[in-house]
Image (tube, rainbow, N blue to C red):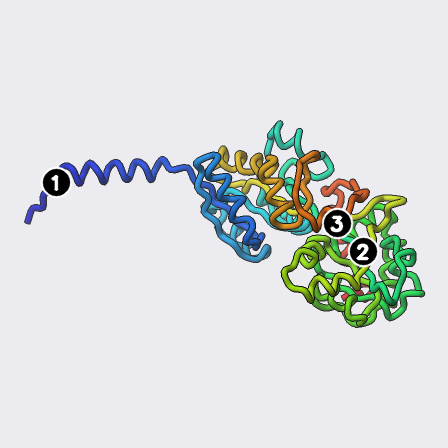
Amino acid sequence: MNFRIPLLALALATVSLGTSAQEKVLNLYSARHYQTDEALYANFTKQTGIRINRIEGKEEELMERIRNEGANSPADIFITVDAARLAKADELGLFASVKSPLLESRIPAHLRTSTWFAFSTRARVIIYNRSALKAEQVQTYESLADPQLKSKLCSRSGAHPYNLSLVSSLIAHNGEAKTEEWARGVVANFARAPKGGDTDQIKAVAAGECGVAVSNTYYLARLIRSDKVDDRRMMERVGIVWPNQATTGTHVNISGGGMVKTSKNQEAAVKFLEYLASDDAQRYFADGNNEWPVVEGVATDNPALTALGKFKADTLPIAQLAKNMVAAQMLLDRAGYR
């Protein structure tokens, strides 16, 4: 039996296939789980015409997926939070080298490598219960090991990348032996076994369960901006210290990403990385998600970040942090920081 396809229908099908084949796309594997990023991606598509296909998941799952997909991976970009995770992806050989004069001019040298780039920062600050301690007692990360804080310190797991990055920076500044001695002092000051996330530490400090803890500013700003009265009242009981202002500066962690080595859309991938360093994208990170821009001079409008104030940030290269990650974990294990 013969079937005849109308010429108009055939023509339309041909046009449709051609359009689909020529459509510009970017396949993004993201471990960032923030609703505010929707506007970030939509603006990129509006500016470039490049549609974003996004797959979200946990860092380890996405890295393993890219490895398993091998040369057939559709991934063009992998983004996540924390230098430790980006360093792990690089160690696994997932990233390609990117040469971009724009990225090199806009992102400070200590916040990028040849394969991955920071696009926003969060500072790791000391928080304390205003009724239990004074700011003068906890001015540095090193002070957290002071015996006067015995049974007053709360923490999340020593194996968490946030803590690994901080300890890596301390190794770079103070050496491994002194940092291990510090870690043992911190363990001796625990009010409870490490558990929970940064928000749990903030709540514990506010409730008086412990006197002091460490938190990323992202979580503090979110509570300061909260619509819930209880959250804002809780923050009134918590003091915030920018650590090590007289010496190395406050440790900062990052959110960043790089182009996947097997990317089939390299031109679009580089455009996306460059877009993340644009003024528009930098404002989305700050105003939408309580992170600081990495590009200097970008005007933002976030009352919580303004309330936190200005500070001296540690300018230790993030690549150096990556080199100390394994030593940091072994050191914490020896100190009993679980």
Which kind of residue does numbered mark 2 sit on?
A: Ile
How busy is the neighbourhood of tag 1: few (under 14 within 10 Å), some, or many (20 plus)? few
Q: Mark 2 or mark 3: which comes first in sequence?
A: 2
* Whole-percent x, y for residue 279 in the image: 61, 35
Dot 3 falls on a residue whose secondary structure is helix
The residue carrying mark 1 is 6
Q: Are marks 3 and 1 in contact (CB under 8 Å)?
A: no
* Whole-percent x, y for residue 285 in the image: 62, 45
Which kind of residue does numbered mark 3 sit on?
A: Ala
Which kind of residue does numbered mark 1 sit on?
A: Pro
Question: What whole-number distance in Å separates the C-alpha atoms at marks 2 and 1?
Answer: 72 Å
* Whole-percent x, y for residue 284 in the image: 59, 44
Residue 63 appears in the figure? no
Q: Is residue 230 left or right of residue 137?
A: left
Q: Residue 272's mark?
A: none
How busy is the neighbourhood of tag 3: few (under 14 within 10 Å), some, or many (20 plus)? few
Dot 1 falls on a residue whose secondary structure is loop
Q: Is residue 37 left or right of residue 112?
A: left
Q: Is residue 145 left or right of residue 164?
A: right
The residue carrying mark 2 is 240
In which quadrant of the rendered image does the C terminus lie?
bottom right
* Whole-percent x, y for residue 100 in the image: 60, 30
Q: Mark 2 or mark 1: which comes first in sequence?
A: 1
Dot 2 falls on a residue whose secondary structure is strand
The residue carrying mark 3 is 307
Say which of 300 and 296 sits in front.
300
Question: What whole-number distance in Å separates the C-alpha atoms at marks 3 and 1?
Answer: 67 Å
Say which of 114 and 118 sits in front.
118
Query: Looking at the image, is mark 3 or mark 1 nearer the viewer?
Result: 3
Which residue is found at the position 90% from the left and 68% from the top? Answer: 150
Which residue is found at the position 66% from the left and 36% from the top? Answer: 298
